[in-house]
Amino acid sequence: MQAELIDIRNHMAQFPPFDEMPEELLDHVVGGVEVQYFRAGTQILEFGQDNPWLYYIRSGAVEIFRRSGELYNRIGEGDIFGQFGLLMNKTVRFPAKALEDTLIYRIPEATFQYLFENDDGFADFVETEDRSRLRSAVSRREKSNDLMTSKVTRLISRAPVSAPCTVRLQEAARIMTDQGVSALLLMDESGDEPRLKGIITDRDLRTRAVTEALPSETPISDIMSEGLITIRASAYIFEAMLMMLHNNVHHLPVMDKDEVRGVIALSDIVKYESQSSLYLVSNIYHQNDVKGLKKLSRDVPDTFVRMVNEDANSHMIGSAMAGIGRSFTQRLLELGEEKLGPPPIPYCFMALGSMARDEQLVVTDQDNAMILDDSFVPDEHDEYFQALAKFVSDGLAECGYKYCTGEIMATNPKWRQPLRVWKGYFTDWIENPKADALLNSNIFFDLDGIHGQNGFAEELKALVAEKASHSQRFLSLMARNALNRTPPLGFFRTFVLEEDGQHRKTFNLKRRGTAPLSDLIRIHALACGSRAQNSFERLKAIGQTKLLLEDDLGNLRDALEFISIVRIRHQALAIEAGRAPDNNVRPEDLSPFERSHLKDAFQVVSNAQKFLRFRYNAQVGRNAQ
Amino acid sequence: MPSNPDDQVSNPKATWPEQYRTLADQARSPLLKAFYEAGCVDPDTPMSDVPLVAVDFETTGLDPNQHSIVSVGLVPFTLNGIQLSRCWHQVVRPALPLHQTSIEVHGITHSDIDKAPDLAEVLDKMFSYLNGRVPVVHYREIERPFFNVALQWRLGEGIRFPVIDTMAIEAHLYPDRRPGRWQRLLGRKPVSIRLADSRLRYGLPHYASHNALIDAIATAELLQAQVYHHFGPNTPVKDLWL
């Protein structure tokens, strides 16, 4: 390459797959380029035509079509096309047309073949279609995190220590001391094979046996925990971490079918990954007042940044942050109950929105509600629950979880009601849906019990799962609301920018990225009768039905992961720079790699919205009949 | 004294191939003889079939009789493609001192020039690009006259050839580009036909650097855009050359 062509090389060096190419190789590419101008509207490639070139867009915009003539993609500056034909018989598979006046750099087939054989990054890039390209971008990130790639079995250091569930308290304590374990598995040995029945931990011994001064002859079955949460042996460590965070348990039996392979403890994961968010969570439970919690809450942004820097995926980060939020809430409820005395009737404290979905980040409101037992008598009981709700809500605000501007909090009497009223709310939303009302109640369709009688929340989930799938009108209106927020992709596959509070041209990764995605995933999940709350779990549940194609599910998963992780990284950078994290991103702050994959991801969202409109017959702007 | 070949030919347009044949007979320099013998395309050849070469010189000034060529950039092309693999850039030693102002424009320094050959030493290579192709320039008052004078000095005879001038094409498209006094008062802005400004009108990218080669490439791209926008690939070359 002549040194005078540096302008051309510098342009290509900004865009994948050329951005990571060694300099000499890129010089070689530039040296072989042929430049060609296409006026807007000109056909660049016809289907089936011989084509010995790879096309690089220097300026302008190009439309790529399917064989059927259907528009497949719009691409612009720095994008390439023609690669599929070059990989297949050198005939054009996707016709291309100049949408704007376009300047093309053509790279000869010989150079293409040479790059394909000698540059792995290039080969990976051209071989995968754009959306599978997004997938490999996602998996490349995940590879670097240990928690994501190591199985839980790696943490098992010894055979499980167990005893029959018929042993007495003193015997159980002796076995634990002798064996030096913090948890003892208790087996039901009445059948042919011993079966895992329960677990007793150090903490249980302290809190249940010692503080209540139980006699040493007490049967262990009186105080053991049953209905165990277990994890399968093939799971990854991060899944164990999510499970502990979500359920607030510190020990997980690892199961190989019906057989116990061992027990992993929270401390095993903390040791394995010393900076893990579990450490923060376990500390939350050691705080004895709001002041202590507030002090600890200052570590939350650091934990967040650390996970981002360790290349955790968005599911892990979202769950960890939700787990932390849930732990703050649970601890505040415990402290509240200590202060106000035990609750007069059973209740369930419910998380809503992102916390319920396990998709929380650092900037977040508190969205919560209370389901009270049906024996609720307002005059007798509400003073207590109102005080408890206020204590928790104020405590959360101290800890950085802002009050919900929409008043969706247990402090609002409307959202502090007995179970039967809640059932009435949901039945009304689903059976007599109104678009405006649904817009406000959307958030209640992500719900999770986090304290007290969690069975109440499960009953609501069951009701929603049962009724929602049968109400076409409900689904249609939900879909219509979900289409209000579109991805920020313009006609030319450029980003559509809005002015943010500081008059910067940005797009909002939450409002125009993750929110429309979780909205549309929720609707499909409701249509399937799924009870899952997390978007990734919902996608799994949708996968069990024939509602979406396997490919589309994969694309949605990758798009959600990619947009989320860019949003997460954007917030982490702000925290590290000492700025307040937000969701507004300027395109120029993204790497060319991120820009290019974000466009892929937004395209997925846009296609998924089209399908949503079609599937649920949701015409935007059409009045409800 | 060297003279502008345009002055000597009353109507060159239709007669370029004919003139080449006559000039081939007259030329004494083997380089020039070979150039003319390589011939000139038929004036009715459609633009899409014309072998072209974009030429750009950086010079020490604007007057061919006072100033010198500092660098040359050439790139062969057709309407269908500009071949970067065949492009050529060469710094040459000017016969006259290098002005400080032109250093600022080209980024060519005295030390570059001290090592550079005289144009005479690279004429072989230069003609290998020009033979059989129609030169394309942006502003014909530079390349053709400077080359003519340079050859007068070095070979003792000048050169004539047709050029396609992308600036002349823009001038033709915008005959009223300089608003009169009244129009200026009414706020009309002049239309610039400089290379970078003309390119903007066709959606062509901005090049950060300026050297004879990138300007030659920029000119070639501009001609492709002009032909596709205003004339079409079947336009005979005689409509565009000067």
Image (tube, coloured by chain):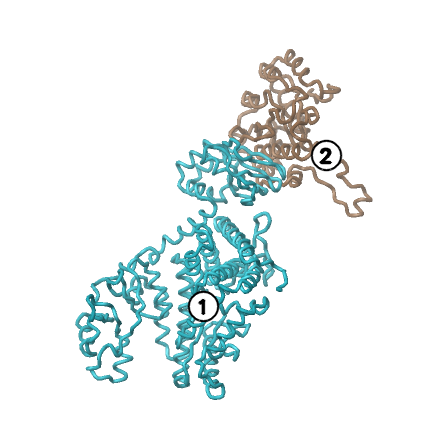
Chain colours: A cyan, B brown
Q: Which numbered marker is on residue A355? A: 1
Residue type at numbered disc 2: Ala
| Residue projecting furthest to the right | B182
Q: How many labels were placed on the picture?
A: 2
Query: Can residue A39 be seen here?
Result: yes
Residue type at numbered disc 1: Met
- Seen from the viewer's position, the closer of residues A373 and A347 is A373
Which chain letter goes with mark 2? B
Viewport quadrant of the N terminus of chain B: top right
Q: Residue at x 75, y 19 (%)?
A: B10
Q: Is A483 situated above or below A189?
A: above
SS of the residue at dot 2?
A: helix
A273 horizontally vs A417: left or right: left
- Seen from the viewer's position, the closer of residues A388 and B13 is A388
Among the 4 quarters of the image, the one containing residue A178: bottom left
Residue position for label 2: B171
Which chain letter goes with mark 1? A
User: Percent from the top left, x then y, of residue B185?
Assistant: 80, 47
Report whether mark 1 lies on the same chain as mark 2.
Answer: no
- Seen from the viewer's position, the closer of residues B28 and A98 is A98
Q: Is B150 situated above or below A623?
A: above
Q: Is A307 situated above or below A432?
A: above
User: Percent from the top left, x then y, of residue B29?
Assistant: 60, 14
Viewport quadrant of the C terminus of chain B: top right
| Residue projecting furthest to the bottom | A380
Q: Is A110 situated above or below B131?
A: below
User: Percent from the top left, x then y, of residue A40?
Assistant: 63, 39
Q: Residue at x 47, y 38 (%)?
A: A84
- Crowding at dot 1, Cα within 10 Å, few <14 / some 14-19 / many 20+, comes out as many
Query: Can residue A75 be seen here?
Result: no
User: Percent from the top left, x then y, of residue A29?
Assistant: 47, 35
- Seen from the viewer's position, the closer of residues A472 and B11 is A472
